[in-house]
């Protein structure tokens, strides 16, 4: 398996062998039941959904895998050829697929900030604070006048900030607690506490090195 579904529990710090503190994010990763296997993809579930909130189509789908209750979320992951045979429907995938030192990428929905200006959204410097200036947090000029007579697509302007899918690449697995299904990742991950995340293995160098 190449990944798991999890839930962000919060941040803390741990100490390495040299006594240096390392900020980490704690993720409840799994256990994830295998709902369906097809080709090179495996569909995993996470959490539980109330029966009265479960559609009949979803209830029938998970019943084929031998699950009594439908998972809260479903996500498909590719099966790496090096891992051998893929898990079967009804089995459970745990956090034991990760090991300390692995590189992973984490995908989640960022915190929603609502409608924000350019100073908050894009870190613009703003205008002068004194000498009669009244445009302290304005974006300033947004385009020339006669040519091109329009605003270029992609211009950074005020608008909705956050609440979008974001993937943080190259995070290092600091510690794996298989008994409690906890994954300790160095650094921060997108989303609020209790937000759903997908954690996938990643190979190659990282900007965090």
Image: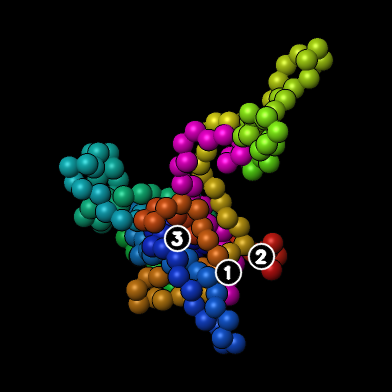
Question: Which of 173/186 is in front?
Answer: 186
- Does the magenta portion include 193? no
Q: Report which residue position mark 3 lands on.
A: 4
Magenta region: which residues? Answer: 100-122
SS at badge 1: strand
Question: Which of 79/49 is in front?
Answer: 49
Question: Which of 129/27 is in front?
Answer: 129
Q: Report which residue position mark 1 lands on.
A: 172
* Quadrant of image for the C terminus: bottom right
Question: Which mark lies nearer to you, 3 or 1?
Answer: 1
Which class describes the residues within 10 Å of circle 2: few (<14), some (14-19), or many (20+)?
few
**Residue 8 drawn above or below residue 70:** below
Q: Residue at x 66, y 38 (%)?
A: 129
For residue 43, say whether it is visible.
no
Q: Earlier in the sequence, mark 2 or mark 3?
A: 3
- Does the magenta portion include 111? yes
Which class describes the residues within 10 Å of circle 3: few (<14), some (14-19), or many (20+)?
many
Q: Earlier in the sequence, mark 2 or mark 1?
A: 1
Question: Which mark lies nearer to you, 2 or 3?
Answer: 2
Q: Report which residue position mark 2 lands on.
A: 208
Image quarter of residue 131: top right
**Residue 34 drawn above or below residue 142:** below
Q: Left or right: 142 with respect to 74? A: right
Question: Residue 35 appears at what percent x and percent y?
Answer: 35, 54
SS at badge 2: loop
Question: Residue 34 appears at what percent x and percent y?
Answer: 37, 58
């Amino acid at each position: 398996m190449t990944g798991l579904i999890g839930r962000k529990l919060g941040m803390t710090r741990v100490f390495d062998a040299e006594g240096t503190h390392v900020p980490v994010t704690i993720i409840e990763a799994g256990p994830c039941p295998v709902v369906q296997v097809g080709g090179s993809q495996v569909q995993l579930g996470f959490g539980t959904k109330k029966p009265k909130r479960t559609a009949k189509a979803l209830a029938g789908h998970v019943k084929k895998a031998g699950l009594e209750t439908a998972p809260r979320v479903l996500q498909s992951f590719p099966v790496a050829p090096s891992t051998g045979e893929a898990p079967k429907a009804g089995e459970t995938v745990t956090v034991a697929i990760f090991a300390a030192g692995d590189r992973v990428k984490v995908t989640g929905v960022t915190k929603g900030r609502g409608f924000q200006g350019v100073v908050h959204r894009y870190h613009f410097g703003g205008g002068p604070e004194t000498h009669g200036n009244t445009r302290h947090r304005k974006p300033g000029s947004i385009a020339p006048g006669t040519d091109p007579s329009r605003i270029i697509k992609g211009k950074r302007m005020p608008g909705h900030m956050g609440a979008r899918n974001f993937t943080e690449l190259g995070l290092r697995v600091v510690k794996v607690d298989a008994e409690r299904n906890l994954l300790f990742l160095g650094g921060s991950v997108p989303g609020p506490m209790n937000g759903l995340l997908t954690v996938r293995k990643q190979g190659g160098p990282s900007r965090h090195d």
